[in-house]
Image (cartoon, helix red, strand yellow):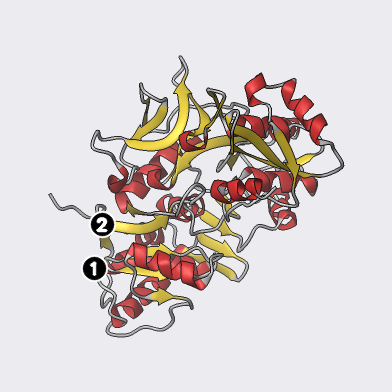
């Protein structure tokens, strides 16, 4: 049976009209202002021929104009396709083609056309495609994923159950909005009528200053961002109750530093297909239970992590009704999830499986290592040889790093080769791009 739900921003404009909805470098909008601007933008979209089931691509920077477009498109029944602004134009065109997007919004939508209210509705279909986001593409070409309003609603409810939803919340987002981790902050803030604080790009000093100001209650970032904050001397934040950390393996020494500084770091596990995280740990924990609404299982053959629930994109489900994540992991007796890494990334050396993330974590504990990436390279003796590429903060010898690993890992997990490089290939979300890492390893 067809049903509709109230537009989140419209509802927030009724209940908290003067409360800040979005803050960015260029200014801020209250919920009453965001509601009005979204309605004007919706009428402008209608005048441009955008209607139900249309898909609109955008390259707007994180900020107020992006938020206006995000909330305007559902009012005309259309979906947003945020493009990766760090890709060259031809790759952006490829994303538009894959997502079926026609109109490209590169500048703010201004003005209005037609009588008041023309082309816009405040009652939305929760089953309609709301956003089309691309996977991170760390091991292959990024794929489009269709997420509905119902998916985002379930994700927001699961997040609130895990973290709480305080009316005074101010969620800091230094992540790109073309990835689900960043976009989810804007959507969850609208769902609970709280404030999203957007940074156009990650600047460690600016993030540290915002956290130190005492105005931020929640923040999301990837491990490399937290490492940069450590480098600039981040101090405990008086109001911060959760610093969500996800998107890749987290060096144990970084978590230890965060605990020493009494930073409320909570690690997360999720992906584009799940509308962001489906597992959130308690502070100081390395594993956690699924959020409300999410169900986890481990495939009997192969150990693959399976997920299902109302936050999972329907087109990502297999015939058995589960999302097959491609990640290897296990559930302990408490029902906590432990993630080993991508199944396709497992290195088979001499008949033994090696999880690159485990070796990377060991290397990152070394005081000289700033960054590390581990891949398997074809080898006539071992089938695949474990090869580590490291970025150093200070001098260290390859043999010393191998000895360091030998003291912490099983023999087959110790890199056969350690190469020093200037930088590692990471995408906008801070994740290692494995296919590029493999190419880099093969060139040394």
Residue drawn at (28%, 46%) of the image: 314
Q: CA distance from mark 1 to mark 2?
A: 9 Å
Q: Is residue 108 visible?
A: yes
Residue drawn at (73%, 37%) of the image: 418
302 up-or-down from 213: above or below? above
**Considering the numbered disc 2 on the image, is that residue within a helix, a strand or a loop?**
loop
Left or right: residue 32 compared with residue 199: left
Determine which residue is flagged by label 1. Answer: 52
Q: Nearer the viewer, residue 279 or 145?
A: 145
| CB-based contact (under 8 Å), mark 1 and mark 2 | yes
Residue drawn at (63%, 28%) of the image: 284
In this rendering, the count of numbered labels is 2
Which circle's residue, 1 or 2, is located before the other in the chain? 1
Q: Residue furthest right?
A: 395
Label 1: few (<14), some or many (≥20) within 10 Å? some
Q: Residue 128: which disc?
A: 2
Give the quarter of the image for residue 381: top right
Left or right: residue 362 compared with residue 396: left
313 up-or-down from 175: above or below? above
x, y percentage for residue 305? 41, 30
122 up-or-down from 341: above or below? below
Q: Nearer the viewer, residue 84 or 409?
A: 409
Q: Is residue 221 visible?
A: no
Left or right: residue 145 compared with residue 359: left
């Amino acid at each position: 049976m067809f049903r509709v739900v109230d537009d989140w921003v419209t509802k927030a404009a009724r209940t908290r009209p003067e409360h800040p909805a979005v803050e960015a470098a260029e200014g801020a909008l209250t919920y009453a202002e965001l509601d009005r601007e979204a309605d004007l933008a919706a009428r402008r979209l209608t005048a441009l021929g955008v209607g139900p089931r249309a898909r609109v691509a955008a390259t707007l920077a994180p900020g107020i104009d992006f938020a206006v477009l995000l909330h305007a498109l559902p009012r005309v029944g259309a979906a947003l396709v945020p493009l990766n602004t760090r890709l060259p134009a031809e790759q952006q065109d490829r994303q538009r083609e894959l997502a079926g997007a026609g109109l490209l919004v590169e500048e703010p939508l201004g003005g209005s056309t037609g009588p008041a209210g023309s082309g816009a509705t405040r009652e939305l279909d929760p089953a309609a495609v709301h956003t089309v986001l691309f996977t991170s593409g760390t091991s292959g070409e990024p794929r489009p994923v269709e997420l509905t309003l119902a998916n985002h609603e379930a994700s927001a409810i699961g997040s609130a159950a895990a973290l709480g939803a305080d009316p005074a919340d101010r969620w800091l987002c230094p992540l790109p909005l073309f990835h689900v981790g960043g976009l989810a902050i804007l959507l969850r803030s609208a769902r609970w009528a709280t404030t999203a604080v957007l940074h156009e790009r990650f600047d460690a000093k600016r993030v540290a200053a915002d956290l130190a100001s005492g105005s931020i209650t929640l923040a999301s970032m990837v491990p490399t961002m937290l490492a940069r904050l450590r480098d600039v001397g981040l101090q405990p934040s008086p109001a911060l109750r959760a610093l969500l950390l996800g998107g890749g393996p987290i060096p144990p020494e970084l978590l230890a530093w965060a605990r020493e500084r009494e930073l409320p770091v909570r690690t997360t596990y999720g992906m584009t297909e799940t509308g962001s995280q489906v597992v959130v740990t308690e502070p100081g924990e390395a594993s956690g239970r699924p959020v409300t609404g999410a169900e986890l299982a481990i495939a009997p053959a192969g150990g693959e992590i399976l997920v299902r629930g109302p936050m999972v994109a329907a087109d990502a489900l297999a015939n058995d009704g589960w999302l097959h994540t491609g990640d290897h992991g296990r559930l302990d007796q408490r029902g906590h999830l432990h993630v080993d890494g991508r199944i396709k990334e497992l290195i088979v050396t001499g008949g033994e499986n090696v999880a690159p993330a485990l070796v990377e974590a060991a290397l990152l504990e070394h005081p000289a290592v700033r960054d590390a990436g581990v891949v398997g390279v074809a080898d006539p003796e071992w089938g695949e040889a474990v090869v580590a590429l490291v970025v150093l903060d200070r001098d260290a010898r390859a043999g010393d790093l191998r000895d360091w690993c030998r003291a912490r890992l099983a023999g087959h997990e110790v890199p056969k080769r350690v190469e020093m490089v200037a930088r590692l290939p990471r995408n906008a979300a801070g994740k290692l791009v494995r296919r590029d890492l493999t190419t880099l390893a093969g060139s040394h």
